Image: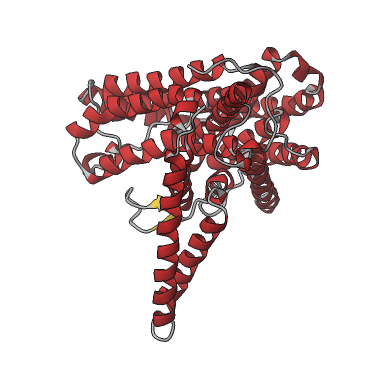
Amino acid sequence: MRRSTAPAVGLAVVRAVLVAAALVLSGALGALVPSHRRTAILLGGATLVVAVVLVDPLLLTVAAAPGALLLQRLGGSAAGSSVDLSDVILLVGTGLALPMVRWGRAGWLRSALRFGLAYELLILPVVAAHPNSHDVLEWVHRLLLVSGALVAGWAVAVAGRARQALSAFLAAAIVLAVITCVVAVHLHFKAAQFGAYQKNYIGSVMWMAVAVAHLNPSWAGIDRRLARPAKYLCALALLASHSKQSIVALLVALGLAIVAQRALRRRSKILIVALVPLGVFAYWVSMAELRSKQINSLTYRGQLLSGGMHVFRQSPWLGQGLHWFYLPQYVSSFGQPPNLEVGALASGGVVGLVAIVVLLVGLGLVLRRLPKPVGMLALCVLVGRVVQTQFDLFWVSAAGMLPFLIAGMALGVADRARSTLSCGALSGGSSALGGDLPASPVPPGP
């Protein structure tokens, strides 16, 4: 079979550009050291990044998974023009992954991207109706969080490095879990949060880490010596965060997996027993807040939902814009509604709600068509995220990218297995042959 040389040419061009960039940066670094030390340090960091990419082009793509925990803000103001470090890592990782995609052998990826691109096209009239820099940047941002994460995850899996990416994610989650537990003790077991790490973000990362560590599909192959401590430490940190919606998301995600996979039930008994206190805790705290006459998280969420519906009624078809809550008339009155559907209605009206339904239902159906050993983790994380965002924000950079990144890995495993079964091996180098193939045959892609 004749092999396409387009990806190889693309990689050669990228390497040539990077070599030229390294030479330019090195020369500039030498010239600036005596008089501009701060600029020299930044250039030195950029030179190091370029060198790393030259040695291992996919390393920054692999780093997108643990990089989701980096919430440091880079540049801009607090009013929506700054970006997270996690966004930058995902952007660079996606850019490095794109030249490696063989679109003719990426049937599952193409199917998923159709829904990601359909979402972007559907919300384009919303951006056109509210022309401002915040909305344009957010449209690009969502393209990165969905389609960019799918491509990055796919490239990592096709290269046989899903285990490396998910293991690094769990290692980073363990660090965050330990810090969270220490902070909880210091705060006398009040909701643990610190710096940029708000309790609901911590809860989001912790429940996804528990799901990854427990389900641990054969294609991920995470070492049990890492998966077991990660599972229980992250469950403890989830409890310390007091994030009730994250607890519910974990219960739903694992419940779906246990019902769907008989083999998983036998090794889930201990975890089920451990999760019971989490469910009881979430119920107890929710009931206490409902009975309380003081302002708490539940009553505050009710106010935000009411405000979101008020914003929706002012423009029911196209909403008030993707970042309407930064507009002067709303910035002091309403915040983002903590609900996926109300948030979509407020920002994009009926068009925005249709767009998010198309994206999530379409991607869910693609993942459901995969064999259970391949697609179950991604499907459970996606469903859990939808459940969580019935009480929380959906478009949050770090927590928002992880479900799509994991989905991209599952799609990559399926495309890689299909290509291996039909051609004997993927072209493009031996690195594409590493890792585990799924335990069951993978049907032809769409």
Q: Position of residue 203 (x, y in %)?
A: 59, 38
For residue 95, say whether it is visible: no
Q: Residue at x 63, y 27 (%)?
A: 424
Q: Position of residue 51 (x, y in %)?
A: 52, 62
Rendered image quadrant of residue 305: top left
Q: State the residue in front, 343 or 214.
A: 214
For residue 406, say whether it is visible: yes
Q: Is residue 174 above or below residue 386?
A: below
The single residue placed furthest to the bottom in the displayed view is 34
Q: Residue at x 67, y 13 (%)?
A: 260
Q: Is residue 122 above or below residue 92?
A: above
Q: State the residue in front, 184 or 246.
A: 246
Q: State the residue in front, 217 or 108.
A: 108
Q: Specify whether 325 is left or right of 45.
A: left
Q: Specify whether 249 is left or right of 127.
A: right
| Scheme of colours in the image | secondary structure
Rendered image quadrant of residue 123: top left
Q: Position of residue 62 (x, y in %)?
A: 57, 45
Q: Residue at x 45, y 17 (%)?
A: 361
Q: Is residue 49 above or below residue 267?
A: below
Q: How many marks?
A: 0
The single residue placed furthest to the front in the displayed view is 2
Q: Is residue 292 above or below residue 329?
A: above
Q: State the residue in front, 153 or 208.
A: 153
Q: Position of residue 199 (x, y in %)?
A: 56, 42
